[in-house]
């Protein structure tokens, strides 16, 4: 069974150029409230790891974690916060974009989509952006436990269609029940060669 990812918080930055170059790097994105912090904590089996990126002032930063052999996991700011004023929001988009397009060590972006809600307009925009710029990505649906078992097949199919990917390529996880967490750990280790 895959053991928890031994993630260690390194630092937060507004500009990826300020961050040390880790080895290969995987980034995690999603709209706020999608379950990103809960998922990072579940992957590491560490209740408060991603709390650091939730503290006020850090939610809009690029947060870098490293694994024991030096590969990186990057927690990108959640998109779609209604409370963010226009100016900050624009700067924040630029920050994410320059990270996604310029970070040389980035090997894959995990796009988190709420499994209970399905893909939102912003999720689809993010996926289109990654496709248009040839940035490799994988779709991870969250909150598996929140959907009735009788509805899961249909939900997964609809979510895959909405995201424009094959059903078999959607990893559906739950930070609460633990479903899919081991599989996602293996996926991340494989992509990062850790
Ligand atoms: P973030 O804003 O993307 O970092 O989202 P959080 O990790 O803070 O989660 C947002 C809300 O969804 C919180 O109330 C979590 O408890 C809840 N949540 C996150 N993951 C799960 C899950 O797998 N199952 C259930 N039932 N709730 C979840």
Image: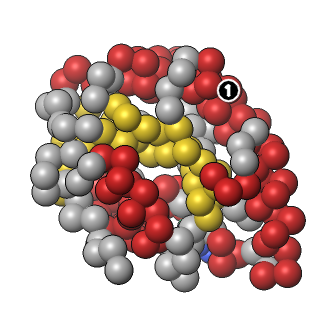
Q: Nearer the viewer, residue 125 or 164?
A: 164
Q: Is residue 85 visible?
A: no
Q: Secondary structure at mark 1?
A: helix
What residue is shown with label 1? 128
Q: Is residue 82 left or right of residue 35?
A: right
Q: Residue at x 81, y 46 (%)?
A: 161
Q: Residue at x 21, y 64 (%)?
A: 6
Q: Nearer the viewer, residue 162 or 116?
A: 162
Where residue 164 sits in the image (x, y, percent)? 75, 39
Where residue 64 sits in the image (x, y, percent)? 26, 43
- Number of labels in the image equals 1
The image quadrant in which ligand 1 is located: bottom right
> Is 41 rendered above or below residue 136?
below
Q: Quadrant of the C terminus?
A: bottom left
Q: Is residue 191 visible?
A: yes
Q: Nearer the viewer, residue 177 or 58?
A: 177
Q: Is residue 28 left or right of residue 115?
A: left
> Is 76 rendered above or below residue 171?
above
Where residue 24 sits in the image (x, y, percent)? 26, 38
> Is 116 rendered above or below residue 135?
below
The image's colouring method is: secondary structure
Q: Quadrant of the N terminus?
A: bottom left
Q: Residue at x 25, y 44 (%)?
A: 72
Where residue 157 sits in the image (x, y, percent)? 82, 57
Q: Is residue 159 left or right of residue 48?
A: right
Q: Is residue 29 left or right of residue 170?
A: left
Q: Residue at x 43, y 38 (%)?
A: 108
Q: Residues within 10 Å of mark 1 (few under 14, many from 20)?
A: some
Q: Quadrant of residue 82?
A: top right
């Amino acid at each position: 069974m895959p053991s928890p990812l031994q993630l260690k918080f390194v630092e937060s930055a507004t500009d990826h150029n300020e961050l040390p170059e880790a080895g290969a790097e995987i980034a995690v994105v999603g709209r706020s409230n999608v379950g990103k912090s809960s998922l990072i904590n579940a992957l590491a089996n560490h209740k408060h790891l991603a709390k650091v990126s939730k503290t006020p002032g850090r939610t809009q930063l690029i947060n870098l974690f490293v694994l024991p052999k030096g590969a990186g996991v990057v927690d990108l700011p959640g998109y779609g916060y209604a409370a963010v004023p226009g100016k900050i929001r624009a700067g924040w988009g630029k920050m994410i974009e320059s990270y996604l397009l310029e970070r040389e060590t980035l090997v894959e972006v995990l796009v988190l989509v709420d499994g209970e809600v399905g893909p939102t307009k912003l999720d689809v925009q993010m996926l289109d952006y990654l496709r248009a710029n040839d940035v490799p990505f994988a779709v991870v649906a969250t909150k598996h436990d929140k959907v009735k078992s009788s509805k899961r097949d249909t939900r997964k199919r609809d979510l895959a269609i909405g995201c424009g990917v094959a059903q078999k390529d959607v990893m559906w996880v739950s930070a609460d029940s633990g479903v899919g967490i081991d599989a996602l750990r293996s996926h991340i280790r494989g992509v990062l060669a850790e």
